[in-house]
Image (tube, grey):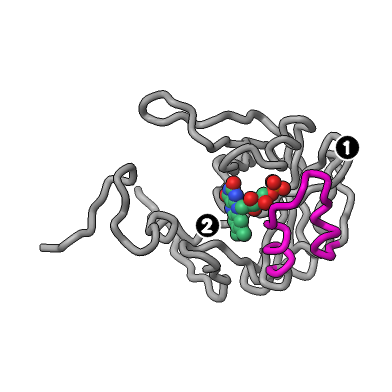
Amino acid sequence: MSDYHSFDPALGHGLPHDPIKAIIAPRPIGWISSIGASGVANLAPYSYFNMFSHKPPILIFGSEGRKDTLSNVVQSGAFVFNLATQDLAQQMNQSSGTYPPLTDEFEMAGLGKLNSDTIAVPRVADAAAAMECRVLETRQLHDLDGQPVLSHLIIGQVTRVHIRADLLLDGRFDMVRAGTIARCGYRGDYVRATQTFEMLRPQIG
Ligand SMILES: Cc1cc2nc3c(=O)[nH]c(=O)nc-3n(C[C@H](O)[C@H](O)[C@H](O)COP(=O)(O)O)c2cc1C
């Protein structure tokens, strides 16, 4: 018989640090670029992020509160997902600072910009991969009592994909060579992809 530490999140975890984000981990990082009404570019990492549809590709990320990225994507209807990798980890982290809305985090982090093909939002130069997205919907989340919570979902459909050519090996994107990083649970914890293994789904019948 196993023992478990069980708790109701509303009542507290009873541990030195909240374990929930350490369990739902590693989380891919959506390094999201957007553009404000004044035309200033914005860049910030979001690890409440994933792909929820393949055909068409649909990406979703979550903003805990009304942040600049949320305001920008509501206003402009577009954003770019940039892949976070080890070589740009410091710049990714720097772009997460709480800067005033008119700050260009590309400049703040010393990053170059590339124009997108389908939207008027720049992407991160040298990023291993990037996906241009147009917003399908944004929505505020509600709890079990129907009360609005801080978090908003931003749902976007991919309109264009960019992959750095040197990271395509035999036609496959090489995430180990790219050095993809992901967010772990506790403050400052990250993981870097160093190995993959193959396991095919069972063939039934
Ligand atoms: C790796 C990483 C992941 C993050 N993930 C999220 C997230 O999923 N949601 C969120 O609201 N903030 C997240 N943050 C914090 C935001 O990046 C931070 O609040 C940033 O200032 C938001 O920028 P903006 O106001 O320009 O959108 C994360 C920070 C880091 C370093």
Looking at the image, is 77 positioned above or below residue 1?
above
Residue 27, labelled with which disc? Answer: 2
Instruction: Report crowding for label 2: few under 14, some 14 to 19, many 20 or more residues within 10 A (C-alpha).
Output: many
Left or right? Give the position of 134 relative to 17: right
Residue lying at 77% horizontally and 30% vertically, measured from the top left: 75
Between 157 and 21, the residue placed more toward the observer is 21
Whether label 1 touches label 2, CB < 8 Å: no
Looking at the rendered structure, the kind of residue marked 1 is Ser
Looking at the image, is 110 positioned above or below residue 144?
below
Residue lying at 64% horizontally and 37% vertically, measured from the top left: 66
| Rendering quarter of residue 127 | bottom right
Q: Marks 1/2: CA distance?
A: 32 Å
Between 33 and 172, the residue placed more toward the observer is 33
Looking at the rendered structure, the kind of residue marked 2 is Arg
Question: Residue 184 at what x, y percent from top left?
Answer: 50, 63
Provide the secondary structure element on which disc 2 rests.
Answer: strand
State whether label 2 is within 8 Å of ligand 1.
yes
Task: Name the residue carrying label 1.
Answer: 38
Work out whether mark 1 precedes mark 2 in sequence or the reverse, and give the earlier one. Answer: 2
Instruction: Report crowding for label 1: few under 14, some 14 to 19, many 20 or more residues within 10 A (C-alpha).
Output: few
Question: Residue 84 at what x, y percent from top left?
Answer: 67, 62
Question: Residue 194 at what x, y percent from top left?
Answer: 56, 75
Residue 181, labelled with which disc? Answer: none
Q: Residue furthest left?
A: 1
What segment carries the magenta color? 89-111
Left or right? Give the position of 88 relative to 205: right
